Amino acid sequence: MDFQTQTYQDKKLSQIVTENLKAAEVLEENNIDFCCGGDKTLEEACSEQNLSSQSIEEQLRQVMEASDSETEYIKNLNASELSDYIVKKHHAFVRKNIPVLKKYIDKISQVHGENHTELYDVKDSFSSASEALASHMEKEEKILFPYIHKMIEAQWLNREMKINSGAVDGPIQQMLHEHETEGERFDWLSEKTDNFKVPDDGCNTYHLTYKLLKEFKNDLHKHIHLENNILFPEAKRLEQELAKKER
C-alpha cells in the first residue's frame, strides 16, 4: 500500500507501535494507552478521549515515514532473545532510576511538600511502584523468562519438551495483571501532577524529578508493550507448538 494512502484508524494500537516504536512517542504525547490498552483501534482510543483520529493519524504518518533501527532490531529477535533484551534495556533502566528518583522525590517533598501536598502522594505511590516492580522483574527473570529460554532451546534442537499445563499461561496472566496495576498507578501519577507539570515556584530539582518521572513512565509503557503485545503472545504460540510435538 502506498504510504500516503495508508490508514491507521482501524489498526490496533499494539500493531501500530510494533510496526514502528517511534509511534509510541506520538501516542504518549496524546495520552493514548498503547501497552495495556493495545487491543483498541486508534479510532476507538481517540473516540474515548474525544480526540481527532485524523489528527493523530497525521502525526503518526510523520514519524513513521522513516524506519526505526530499534524496531527493526526487535523484529529479528526470537522470544528468548527478546526476553534478554527486555532485561538488559528495560529492567536495567528501572533498577538504575528507582534509587535516583526516590532520592529526588524525597528532597522535593521535604522542600516543597507544605505548599504542594500532592508530592506526599507522589512519594508514597512511587515507593509502592518501586517495590512492586522489583518483585515483578524478579519473577520474570527467575520463572517466566528461563522457561521461555528452555522452549526456544527445545525448538532449536528439535526435541520434545515436557509441557506442564499452564506453565506459561499462568505466569503470563499474573504479569499482565501486574502490568495493568502499574500502568494505572502511573496514569494516576500523571493526573496528580498535571502530566508532570512543575509549578511556578519549582526549583531545578523539581524540574529534574518530573522530567525523570515522565521518562520513567514512557519507558515503562514501552517495556509493557514489548511483553504484552510481542513476547507473551509468542511464548504462548511457542508452548502450543511444542505441546503438539509432545502428543
Image (cartoon, grey):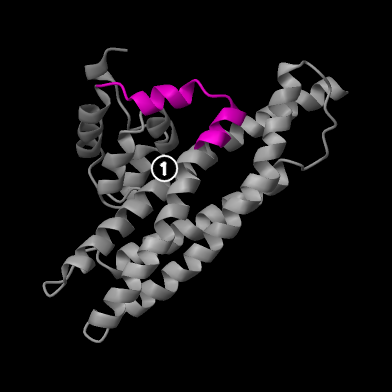
- Residue occupying the point 77% across, 15% down: 158
Q: Residue furthest bottom?
A: 114
Q: Is residue 135 above or below residue 142?
A: below
Q: Is residue 67 left or right of residue 198?
A: right
Q: Residue at x 20, y 63 (%)?
A: 207
Name the quadrant containing residue 46.
top left
Using residue 174 as the reference point, say whether residue 246 is left or right of it: right
Q: Which residues are magenta?
A: 66-85
Image quadrant holding the N terminus, namely top left
The image shows residue 131 at horizontal and vertical percentages of: 54, 65
> Majority secondary structure of the magenta segment?
helix
* Res. 174 visible in picture: yes
Give coordinates of residue 155: x percent, y percent.
73, 20
Residue name at image x 32 percent, y 51 percent: 215
Instruction: Kindly state the secondary structure of the residue where label 1 is placed.
Output: helix
Q: Give the residue pinned by disc 1.
A: 222
Q: What quarter of the picture does the C terminus occupy?
A: top right
11 vs 45: above or below: above
- The residue carrying pointer 1 sits among few (fewer than 14), some (14 to 19) or many (20 or more) residues within 10 Å by Cα, namely some
Identify the amino acid type marked 1.
Answer: Lys
In the foreground, 137 or 118: 137
Q: Residue 19 appears in which quarter of the rendering?
A: top left
